[in-house]
Amino acid sequence: MNTLRSVLTQSEKDGVAVGHFNVASLVMLKAVLSAAAETHVPVLVGASEGERDFLGTRQLAVLFKSLRDELDLSAFLNADHTHSLAKAMEAAKAGFDAVVIDFSALAFEENVARTKETVEAIKAINPAILAEGEIGDIGTGSEIHETAQNGFKSLTTPEEAMQFVHSTGIDVLAPAVGNMHGMLKSMVQGTMKKHLNIERISQIKEATGVFLTLHGGSGTDDDDFRRAIAAGINIIHINTELRVAWRQSLEESLAREPNVVVPYKILPPVIDSVKRVVSSRLRLFNAPEQTGQDGLIDPSHKKAS
Ligand SMILES: [Zn+2]
């Protein structure tokens, strides 16, 4: 089986990105993996500390591997937003393929020191594990926000990105480039889209040369995604869009059959609904710029960037 590193290297050569989708239940896990099976592209399954606490870190790893092997997928498991050495080591020991080490709320020097210590500890457990570090503020909470959060305009600079990568030994960097966690109500309704600073992504890629992750991708303009991938983004996180689809379809499914109490009759439409969101994002992230692999050539590609 391919390693996550080799999959990312190949994706970069092909001008595409690997989609990362968070799961908080078996319904979500089945939705993400069946979308990967349908689209025949690699996928990253993520679980934050809160999601891992709910599912069980070791239990999720076992369930994930069982489904991945049965479906014969190029799928990888990521411990998303991990805020302590102990939680990072727990995920590495459970067999996760990658860990997002998130001390981004701390001052820069403290973030460097804690991240470096954690990178060394998880690589001692599994030398092939990929360590991701984060600098800058992209807000917290993959949920629906009433108003834009403070600080989401302050972007990571190429200089601090280079210094952070070199002093921590991370394999992947999560910068703040106009992205933010969660969605505003207007984004859920589709009347507003997130926009990214493509120039800054190029500068950070140039300065660091490492893989780059875009967090908080939900609600981002499709063309910004394409240009971000061309500028050097390798992994794109989508969470809130899945949660919105999960809740809406669950409410619809429950309302449709008020007297049904059988979970395996209520939940399949929810899996389908979340799966459609994941499949559509995977198709977008895996269509190389200009070539229109999926047969859809977007005229906006001709727009000067
Ligand atoms: Zn994130």
Image (spheres, grey):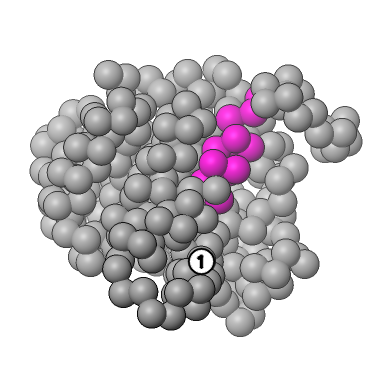
Q: Residue at x 70, y 69 (%)?
A: 189
Q: Position of residue 92 (x, y in %)?
A: 17, 43
The quarter of the picture where the C terminus appears is top right
Q: Is residue 39 visible?
A: yes
- Frontmost residue, 50 versus 175: 50
Q: Which residue is mark 1?
A: 249
Q: Position of residue 274 (x, y in %)?
A: 49, 54
**Boundaries of the magenta span:** 277-288
Residue 26 lies in the magenta-colored region: no
Q: Residue at x 61, y 24 (%)?
A: 15
- Frontmost residue, 293 versus 211: 293
Q: Position of residue 200 (x, y in %)?
A: 66, 44
Quadrant for residue 293, please give it.
Answer: top right
The quarter of the picture where the N terminus appears is top left
Identify which amino acid the numbered label 1 is placed on: Ser
Q: Is residue 168 visible?
A: no
